[in-house]
Amino acid sequence: MPRLCVSVAAIAFVAACSGADPHASADFDAGASGSGGSAVADASGFPDSSADADAAAAPSCSAHGESGSCLDVADCTAPGYAPVPGFCDGPTNIQCCAPTPSGASCDPNAQPEPNAGLVEAPGSGGCPSGMLRISTFCIDRYEAHLVTYPDGAPVSPYFNPGSAAVMARSAAGAIPQGYISQLQAAAACTNAGKRLCSDAEWLRACGGPSATTYPYGNTLQSGVCHDHRAGHPAVEYFMTSDNWIWNELDHPCLNQLDSSLAACGAYSGCTSAEGAVDMMGNLHEWTADPAGTFRGGFYVDTVVNGPGCDYVTKAHDVKHFDYSTGFRCCAD
């Protein structure tokens, strides 16, 4: 996966909140969590004799508080082990092959499909399924998740879809799609018979007919939206605030940690006057701006680039993606 850039406003947030290098981080850090007991990588942890030999000869390392060996990522295939960048010398494909921490629920090599079987609700106001009417246009009620196009098979929301043909869906209880670029989001909307929302449409839907600052009104209410996580997920997952972690914001486990990405509708109060859900927090949402714009903030930050509905990031081009980027569709 391509490595990622960071926004100017997010850099400022890191510098202000965590003391991190102001040129390194995409978001802020308020601490890291611990891990389980250590385990030593040895010959019994690897699937064949050649891998045993590689592991025995490789330099030792430690990641997530677990002991491991510096191996090529292609050789780190033992059950319960995963490669972790940043803890070994040499080229980027040489990483610390270490056990997943005791009690950890995320396997970075798995592609869970939590949205299997979900069905969009009928649209309201004459709009297509999953959508609601806002003045003269329709918008997805929830942040979008993906299915394959045209057959509608589930897609894991924790990975960039690459060149796969996908289409957008909007349903309560779905884990919305992060790790997506504006170009991919636009294609997913088109394949669903919809389109990305314009900036003006997105703002109208978030603030409602009275153009409120937040989806629920003009006064900030803590905890109503998924708008503040106590610690940055990258710092928690990699158990360090070293600068290299800000190049790993496409890691699939970041949105699978506790208190990271929430299911659509989990914050029932985070609803606009006309019924659009999670337009503040949870995931940034791409709009159709050809220069590259996403709005609304996400679960770590809804402050740095403007409050609530006014939050906007314009620091990235349309090919950018990371764990925080999502979308919803509009239609005429």
Image: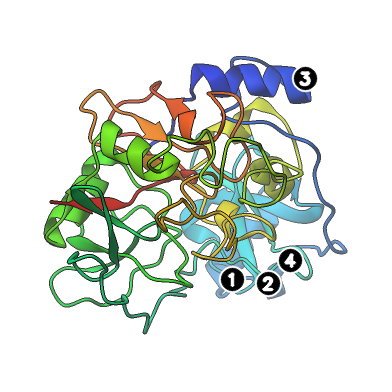
Q: Is residue 37 above or below residue 202?
A: below
Residue that mark 3 sits on: 19
In depth, the one of 75 and 309 nearer the eye is: 309
Cβ atoms under marks 2 and 4 closer than 8 Å: yes
Task: Sort mark 4 into few (<14), some (14-19) or many (20+) by Cα contacts within 10 Å.
Answer: some
Q: Is residue 158 left or right of residue 167?
A: right
Label 2 to label 4, Cα distance in Å?
A: 6 Å
Residue placed at 56% from the left, 42% from the top?
217
Q: Counting residues from the N terminus, which is met first, the one under dot 1 or under dot 3?
A: 3
Q: Amino acid at mark 4?
A: Asp
The circle drawn on residue 42 is: 4
Q: Counting residues from the N terminus, which is met first, the one under dot 4 or under dot 1?
A: 4
Residue placed at 34% from the left, 39% from the top?
204
Residue that mark 1 sits on: 78
Q: Amino acid at mark 1?
A: Ala
Cβ atoms under marks 2 and 1 closer than 8 Å: yes
Quarter of the figure with the N terminus: top left
